[in-house]
Image (tube, rainbow, N blue to C red):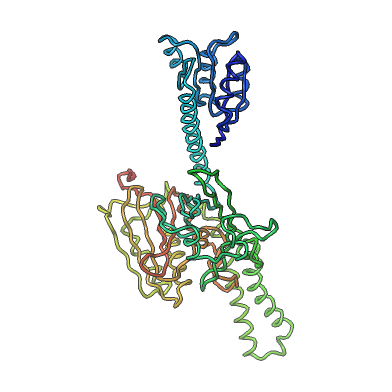
Amino acid sequence: MRHSSTILIVDDEPVGRETLEALLMAQGYNLTFASSGAEALAKAAELVPDLILLDVMMPDIDGFEVCQRLRVDPLLAEVPVIIVTALDDRNSRLRGIEVGADDFVTKPFDRAELRARVRTITRLNRYRRLLAERTKFKWVVEKATDGYLIVNDSGKVLYTNPQARLYLDLPVDESEAISEKFLAVTRKQYRCEPQEAWATWPEQPAIATQSPRYLVRPESPTANTFWLQVDILDLPSGPEAGWIVRLRDVTTHVVEQRMMWTFHGQINHKLRTPLAHLTSFLEVLQKDQSKLSDAKKKVFLSTACQGAMRLRDEVEDILQYVGAPDMVRPDQERCDLTAIPSVAAEVSSSLELKSTHISYEGLEDLDDAYVPISRQLMELVLWELFENAKRFHPGGLPTVEVKISDISDGVRIRICDDGLTLSPDQLAKLWVPYYQAEKRFTGEVPGMGLGLPTVATLVWGLGGTCRAYNREEGPGLVVELVLPLVRNNGGADE
């Protein structure tokens, strides 16, 4: 049987080293030797072995002191040590335990018994190290922007980080077991491309220059094609055999059309288009007004006016977003909870929404409570959310439900519509400035993509939180805002 563990044998007598070498070399261990305590400490620091077989009686630094020094070294403190010595009295054994030895073998020893002890300790140490490495791996990947999975050699998913669960639409709760194998899970949403590269899964493609593996989610009525590059790393053979799988979003590198909802793309299209209408029609009026009929002049003026108004609206969106942080004055502003329904009703009426429902849940003494935001800013927040619901509803006539509830962190305002369902990557970008959740950027969707970022800036400035997710009971989006809840007596709800 072969082992990959490294064992450091420490003995000042050549015969002692040779005896242990003969006993263990047939087992396939990586054996290294030291003939003194000082050499043992140096080699242990260099190699960090899986086990140290340590003689006690040595001239410079005896085995007890070597063990004691190992245990105060953070790098070597957990390396298993078996003391091998001719001393068999009770005091020597107690001293070995006190300095941190894991086991104590007396010469002459039983060869089969020593081999068994070595095999057991190295195996346990290997598992301990694997566990420590997995803990480090999990800590890192839980915070990663790439998706990571651990898949065993039969294809069963053993672990997923939050980003992988998002990409594969898996349950948010990591404790829920995934019954289906990795490929079965991925094929629910994605195509495996190119097929030639996936033919050898999970082994690496036979040709080193072959295209990387991709998971491709086809475009839908509301979302563009989405690309994930899949890379794998083999885990060691044995009980932990399998692969680490990395999922990386490479959509922007694969799709030819650049993401045009960046600031410069928006400025170039959103502002240039109305500006062109405004200037071109005014130039025609200035140069050829004597040749134009009154009806033509009226049409040209109307078009120029529409361009000017659209340009004004786009610039106002930008200025409103830029100035949003300065609007928040939680120590000076307030909006009573009882006022929110009337604000919502006014906004709904102005936007000509046909169905808006407002309700409270779990709140008592409403007359005594408020949120630290002005009525004007509350109107702005609801306007942006209601306007989005109308803008992205297929028929332009959404049903909007507003539920205001008491929670431990403050007051939650939940705005739910019955419009579009968004893909995971669209949901992740909703709070990004100048982003608009449309399949292809056309510039025809009104606004600058600053409504939700403005709301987020206001809410975050108050110490609140924002969250968006798809409705469970049907198409549509839910936006949840959590704001501090303050009582008129000056106290804030815990």
Q: Quadrant of the C terminus?
A: top left
Residue 179 vs 101, above or below: the answer is: below
Residue 176: give x, y in percent of width and height.
38, 52
Residue 333 vs 439, above or below: the answer is: above
Of residues 450 and 186, which is closer to you in this image?
Answer: 186
Residue 345 visible within the image = no
Residue 170 visible within the image = yes
Residue 27: give x, y in percent of width and height.
55, 32
Of residues 272 and 125, which is closer to you in this image?
Answer: 125
Residue 215: give x, y in percent of width and height.
56, 62
Q: How many marks?
A: 0
Of residues 97 and 392, which is closer to you in this image?
Answer: 97
**Along the horizontal axis of the image, is 487 left or right of 329?**
left
**Along the horizontal axis of the image, is 383 left or right of 442?**
left
Task: Return the residue found at the far left.
Answer: 364
Residue 299 vs 236, above or below: the answer is: below
Residue 54: give x, y in percent of width and height.
54, 18
Q: Quadrant of residue 491?
A: top left
**Along the horizontal axis of the image, is 381 left or right of 16?**
left
**Along the horizontal axis of the image, is 47 left or right of 82?**
right
Identified at 50% across, 18% down, the residue is 83
Residue 376 vs 309, above or below: the answer is: above
Identified at 47% across, 65% down, the residue is 188
Of residues 365 and 83, which is closer to you in this image?
Answer: 83
Q: Quadrant of residue 5?
A: top right
